[in-house]
Image (cartoon, rainbow, N blue to C red):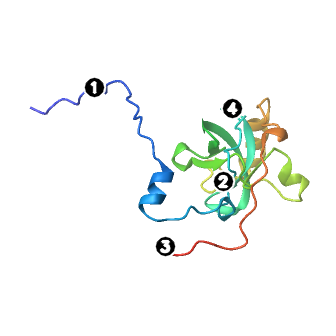
Amino acid sequence: PCPSTPTPGPLVQSTFSFDWESYLKETTSIAAPPDFFKQHLMPPNNEFKIGMKLEALDPRNLTSTCIGTVVGVLGPRLRLRLDGSDNKNDFWRLVDSNEIHPIGHCEKNGGMLQPPLGFRMNASSWPMFLLKTLNGAEMAPAKIFKKEPPTPRSNMFQVG
């Protein structure tokens, strides 16, 4: 007889907290200054909602801008699915990523929306698919996209 799979119990959250000051003192380390990192000191506010449409670079083909749908939200992160793709290719982006934009950004900048790599239909059906996927959809408003933080001039970290 096979043992039965136990039923998962209630979710238990750990209350472990990490004390940076103690750690730095114990290891005689120095904290890296905030300008060494390409991220905001405080995570940006995420106003996206599941189901919103946006433009996103295809992570498997960064020269293609595609229509994406927000399928998950976690803190400042968005789980995105490119329309015409399946959930095996979902990916995450921060709300301040320069790889996501409001619908219309690509066209305004002289580009053309493309089907995602592995588009599940015949390529000739792409224009009609695009019309159907956007018709009546909730577009993510431009005001909820956050500006990407500046990139440090160079990698300023040193060994030790």
Badge 1 amino acid: Thr
Q: Nearer the viewer, mark 2 or mark 1?
A: 1
Question: Alpha-carbon neighbours of circle 2 within 10 Å: few (<14), some, or many (≥20)?
Answer: many
Question: Alpha-carbon neighbours of circle 4 within 10 Å: few (<14), some, or many (≥20)?
Answer: some
Q: Which mark is residue 137?
A: none
Q: Nearer the viewer, mark 4 or mark 2?
A: 4
Rounded to the nearest whole Å, what is the CA distance between mark 4 and mark 2?
22 Å
Contact? badges 4 and 3 (CB < 8 Å): no
Q: Position of residue 101 (x, y in %)?
A: 78, 48
Q: Which residue is mark 3?
A: 160
Q: Secondary structure at mark 1?
A: loop
Q: Secondary structure at mark 4?
A: loop
Badge 3 amino acid: Gly
Rounded to the nearest whole Å, what is the CA distance between mark 1 and mark 4?
32 Å
Q: Secondary structure at mark 2?
A: loop
What's the residue at 81%, 44% (across, down)?
103
Q: Which mark is residue 49?
A: 4
Q: Position of residue 76 (x, y in %)?
A: 65, 42
Q: Nearer the viewer, mark 3 or mark 2?
A: 3
Badge 4 amino acid: Lys
Q: Is residue 59 above or below residue 87?
A: below
Q: Which residue is mark 2?
A: 116
What's the residue at 46%, 65% (across, down)?
28
Q: Which mark is residue 7?
A: 1
- In the picture provided, is 107 more to the left or to the right than 132? right
Question: Alpha-carbon neighbours of circle 3 within 10 Å: few (<14), some, or many (≥20)?
Answer: few
Q: Position of residue 49 (x, y in %)?
A: 69, 32
Q: Nearer the viewer, mark 4 or mark 3?
A: 3
